[in-house]
Image (cartoon, helix red, strand yellow):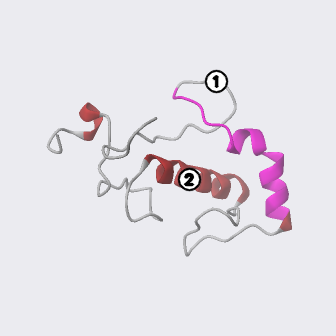
Amino acid sequence: VQRIAIDKRGCRFPWEIPKDMRVHKYYSYSSCVVQCHANAHYNLCNCTHHLMPVLSDQKYCDMEGLECLTENFDTLNRLHAKGSSKPGLVCDCIPSCVEPEY
């Protein structure tokens, strides 16, 4: 299964980390979604919520940044499938090949 291309098998193994996922050492669907949220926080408000992972070249939000996150709550905290026209995030996260799904 590991020899099949990621886009064909539709899942990632823990060691197959996407280039834009720079915080976590191993891939999981949930770590990908967390990274997607953190990136969106930083891209929109120039800071990241203090409960999110942050890279060394980024900063956590001060009060002004937290206001920005609050004002953009609907955009930052709703996940949608690719092609959706609703406000929210579209994260390019696929299931893990080793995590059970319930």
Distance between the alpha carbons at the discs numbered 2 and 1: 22 Å
- For the magenta stretch, what is the residue range? 64-82
Q: In x, y percent, where is residue 80?
A: 59, 31
Left or right of 9 in this view: 3: left
Left or right of 37 in this view: 96: left
Mark 2, Cα crowd under 10 Å, few <14 / some 14-19 / many 20+, is some
Please name the residue that numbered disc 2 is placed on.
34
Is residue 19 shown in magenta? no
Question: The residue under label 1 is which amino acid type?
Answer: Ser
Q: How many marks?
A: 2
Q: Is residue 57 above or below residue 46?
A: below
* Residue drawn at 35 percent across, 56 percent down: 17
Q: In x, y percent, where is residue 51?
A: 67, 63
As helix, strand or loop, the secondary structure at mark 1 comes to: loop
Mark 1, Cα crowd under 10 Å, few <14 / some 14-19 / many 20+, is few
* Residue drawn at 48 percent across, 65 percent down: 23
Left or right of 9 in this view: 48: right
* Residue drawn at 37 percent across, 53 percent down: 18
Is residue 81 shown in magenta? yes
Q: In x, y percent, where is residue 82?
A: 51, 29
Q: Residue furthest left?
A: 3
As helix, strand or loop, the secondary structure at mark 2 comes to: helix
Magenta stretch: dominant secondary structure: helix
Foreground label between 2 and 1: 2
Badge number at residue 85 = 1
Query: Based on the displayed image, in which of its 4 quarters is residue 22 positioned?
Result: bottom left
Question: The residue under label 2 is which amino acid type?
Answer: Val
Badge number at residue 65 = none
Q: Is residue 85 above or below residue 55?
A: above
Q: Is residue 89 above or below residue 20?
A: above
